[in-house]
Amino acid sequence: MTAVQKNSENAENAENAEDAENAESAAGGGGEAGPTADAYVDPLGEPFLRTRFALPTVPATFLRRARLADHLDQALYTPLTVVNGAAGAGKTLLVADWAAGLPGTETVAWLTNDAGEQGPGVFWAYLLQSLRAAGVPVSGEVGCPADAGPVDHKLLARLAAELSALDRPVIVVLDEYDQVTAPEIADQLEFVLHHAGRGMRLILVTRTEPLLPLHRYRAAGAMTEIRNADLAFTPEEAATLLDLHGLSLPEPAARALVDRTRGWAAGLRLCALAAQESPDPQTYLKEFEADRSAVADFLLAEVLRQQTDRTQDLLLRVSVLDRFCPELAEALTGDAGAAGALTELHRQNAFVEHLGHDWYRLHPLFAEILRAHLRSRTPGLEPELHRRAAEWLRRSGSLPETLTHGAAAQDWDFTARALVDDLAIGQLFTGLRRDDLTELFSRMGPETADPAAELVRAARALSRHDLDAGLSHLRAADQHLTRDDADPAGRLSRALLEALAARLAGSCSRAEKAVEQAAELRHRVPAHLLDKHPELTALLLTHLGSARLWAGQFDDARAALSAVVEGSGGAATALPRAEALGHLALIDHLNGWPGRAERKALAAQAETERFGLPQPSGCAVGRLVLAAVAVDRAELSRARALLDEAADARPDFQDPVTAAARSIATARLLLARGDTSGAVAAADPAVPADVPSPWAEGHTALISAAAHLAEGRPDSAAEALERVPCEDQPACAVQMARVRLAEGDREAAVELLGHLGTGGRAGPAVTVRAALIRAQAADEEGDTAAARRLLTQALQEARRDRLRRPFLEAGPRIRRLLRTAPQRDSAAGWLTPDGPRPDGTAAAVAEAPPFVVEELSGRERDVLLRLSRMMSTEEIAADLYVSVNTVKTHLKSVYRKLAVNRRSDAVRRARELRLL
């Protein structure tokens, strides 16, 4: 016989048992003085309601959640169990289903409490009756309360003694225990529980924290707890629940529904029932209006209308806030006493969540419904509440929420001024809130005339690379920012925007001036604001470094960019650091150091990955450098893929440096593939800039000269190079030497190479080409030994950075020398395929496969193998018995070592390298 069947049968037989006990009491047996207990009448003379002793019926669509049932099994071993959750959290059905599933050897006494009860007498009369209905042998000696008032302590002692003598403990479930408000009942219940010992297991199902010494039970390990957060449905559980209702929802949609309802059981069930009536259930579950649903009726009836008028007003007003503390709530209500009201609402599980440190938030569905109720009840009040909130939050120093509520109040003068006064205008360009702020200020209309608003408009225009509009808004702001003592925060923000405008225009002198102005203004603003917003300094130096780079001032550019990289390392400066690393990589590439350039470019990508920022934000130049390095290594497919990624990306700043880097990388790839006319066209993109860049012009000339040489016109190649000062650009000098050699002037070629200098600025991409030209000149002169020595030197320098392209460009004489030992052995495996051909010659230099930057670990290979099987991150984690974060860390390492950025690229490259 199950516990449910036993309860039902015992309830039916309760009358006979009670009559026998009453007769014994009347004959002089023990018991409390006063009226005897009656099977059907409580101390108030009202009949007992048998339904309060029966386990609630579990509906067919109820979902038994094993994790909660297993947790509840601990109730069999601890004296006290508390199931505490909000209205509709599924507390009662959870315990009822668990109790119904207990073996017949367990006895469950169920009592559903009622708000209409008066005093301890009624409570204990009902509890005694529930025990008897469950078949617990409570003798007549225990007695029954004589009235609704105080209960004799002897009755409690006798009950505890009889319970302690039971062979097996009785499980007493008090449902809706929050309806029991008399403090003396809690004291009496704790007394019985304590002295009943092993004879009683008490389960309290409640919306509020019961008035029992819970701390003592927790400290002794004598308490099982299931709280609101435990009762919340997981996305997987929600999907299963919907399936029980005949509804199918994809996992992302189920997750979104759980986020909106916070896994609230009643909300999910009510949504499911309503969706069943909808012609498009999936769309309904995604887009339902909470204020026009059964959820609203439930929450308004069960939660809002249960409160006093004063508390209702508090809830309605704070519904406009994402989070609130008592002081903020009082700023909106104009009424003191919010602290006590919020504490009580949280204690009642009235959909007010405590976040810690006196901060609270409303359940999102409850807040949504309250806001709709506020608009219908008090039209026009909502903007005023947002304005009050914005003013309070600004005084408290919470900028993000200040801006949110200022915008909601449509007070754009206030909102823009708050952003500028906080020195936070740089957050429109970098940081985790960049996209949010961009969307927020996109709603600002043209009517706002405050200078701060003009600065925000300028920032938004410049972020869209609209230089003319940006400068126009800066001039409008200047009308109010001309006085030296006026608005230092506004003038410092303007200096930042002026530096960006100078960068976009390719004007180094304007950028220098803007940074100098910023340096003077830094002393006029509070130091704590500068510390709070390191992105301002990082952006200023990045813009300056980019402008200096465009001007060809490599050493000065490196100093500014290195300061950014070595500065603050938080998310706020991640994008400037990534940009700075990308620009430093470009400097290394232009100087001929591909290995250094690659490491900095990969570091630029890792910088944004570290903070989960969208890719490839901040990495445009870095990707272009990686493409150029891939061309130098004859990895043309990889170069094409990187250029495509850079083309698909939205660069943070479309400045001349980025445009020139893209044209150079594209032109060099086209040239490597034999498209000389396309290369020449791509090398001269007509980058708009106030001042031309010497290195950009130099590399345009380099590409043009190489194209002319490939077509057999060395004279045209020489003309192209003569238009740029080769003595200041080693790569141009090397190319001119190659032209002179093609013209047959070996002496002039060697002389040009002698002017390269020994300062160490030129890297292997330059020196290897120079050595190959010298080797070819020596071979033409018949000095084979010198040619081989120079070729060996070039091979040794090129091997470290896998520089293959210079050998392809060098011509047939160099390739002939590569077929002879020991040069053939030096080239084998990285420049030419391993081993000689059957005829004893080395294979021709071909596009080589990419190489692994660093050996993969065993665990990284495990992750890579599962990646090739199309497993998700979560599936890999489960298969390897590690956390999802651990898998993500391994994936980042795999991407870095394989020099890729996507899963598909990692698998493709691993197969090329025979790692799979």
Image: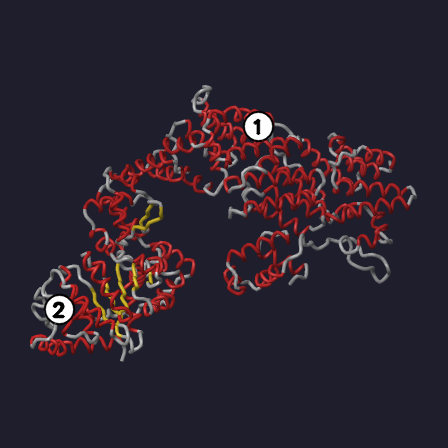
For badge 2, the amino acid type reads Cys
The answer to whether 311 appears left or right of 406 in the picture is left
Task: From the top left corner, tell me how far across and down residue 362 is, in percent.
Answer: 31, 49
Crowding at label 2, few (<14), some or many (≥20) Cα neighbours within 10 Å? many
Q: Quadrant of residue 443?
A: top left
Question: How is colour applied across the structure in the image?
Answer: secondary structure
Can you identify the residue that label 1 sits on? Answer: 511
782 shown above or below 10:
above
Residue situated in front as seen by the camera: 190 or 721 = 190
396 shown above or below 84:
above
Decide which of tag 2 and tag 1 comes sooner along the chain. Answer: 2
Residue situated in front as seen by the camera: 253 or 795 = 795
Task: From the top left corner, tell me how far across and down residue 770 is, in percent.
Answer: 80, 40
Q: Is residue 496 visible?
A: yes
> Can you tell which mark lies on residue 144?
2
Q: Quadrant of residue 207?
A: bottom left
The answer to whether 768 appears left or right of 137 in the picture is right
Q: Furthest residue to the right?
A: 782
Secondary structure beneath disc 1? helix
Q: Residue at x 51, y 42 (%)?
A: 571
